[in-house]
Image: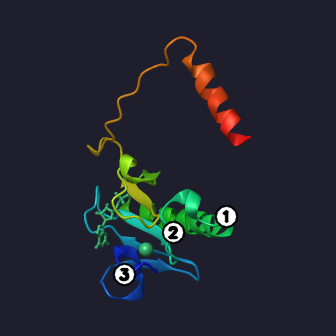
Amino acid sequence: MAADCIFCRIHKGEIPAQKVYEDAKCFAILDINPVASGHVLVLPKDHHETWTDLPADLAADLARATQKVALAAKKAAGAEGYNLLMNNHRCSGQAIFHAHFHIIPRKTNDGKSFEWKTKPYDAGQLDKAADAIRTALK
Ligand code: 5GP
Ligand code: ZN
């Protein structure tokens, strides 16, 4: 529990939210400012800032809960699919520092988009990037 964390305060019942799912370790609420109707946030009850701060067992619990809620959110919205994402750290867009997955129901031509500008690697950079990750994993 972090006293200044909105999601901890929602878990404690200090701030209202539309809770749509709960189990022993995790719960899910509607995002108050959704990308699409039925946009859900799935999160652990315990306060951890990012995905990699979660103890592995809790990450597994959160993954299981997220699968359940994703199916339900897709069905409830009459959606064809969904985006599943987590922002980690401020630079990525994380605004609430209590790890949470976003589930955003999607339909073909629904007008939603993620404006990521992609470009191919410059010569030699793909191999370098892969090597850097392999080294970091050692
Ligand atoms: P982040 O940028 O940290 O990945 O996403 C935080 C999300 O929490 C945002 O999509 C925002 O709309 C949502 N949010 C912020 N404050 C509240 C709140 O008080 N209640 C609920 N249900 N969602 C919130
Ligand atoms: Zn918290």
Q: Earlier in the sequence, mark 2 or mark 3?
A: 3
Q: Is mark 1 within 8 Å of ligand 2?
A: no
- Pinpoint residue 9: horizontal percent, then vertical percent: 36, 82
**Which residue appears farthest toward the right when viewing the image?**
138
Q: Earlier in the sequence, mark 1 or mark 2?
A: 2
Residue carrying label 1? 56
Q: Residues within 10 Å of mark 3 (few under 14, many from 20)?
A: some
Residue 48's label in the rendered image is: 2
Q: As rendered, which of 105 and 29 lies closer to the eye?
A: 29
Q: Quote the CA–CA distance across marks 1 and 2.
A: 12 Å
Could you tell whether 129 is left or right of 88 in the image? right
Q: Residues within 10 Å of mark 1 (few under 14, many from 20)?
A: few
Could you tell me which quadrant the C terminus lies in? Answer: top right
Type of residue at label 1? Ala
Could you tell whether 26 is left or right of 15 in the image? right
Residue carrying label 3? 10
Hey, which quadrant is residue 105 in on the image? bottom left
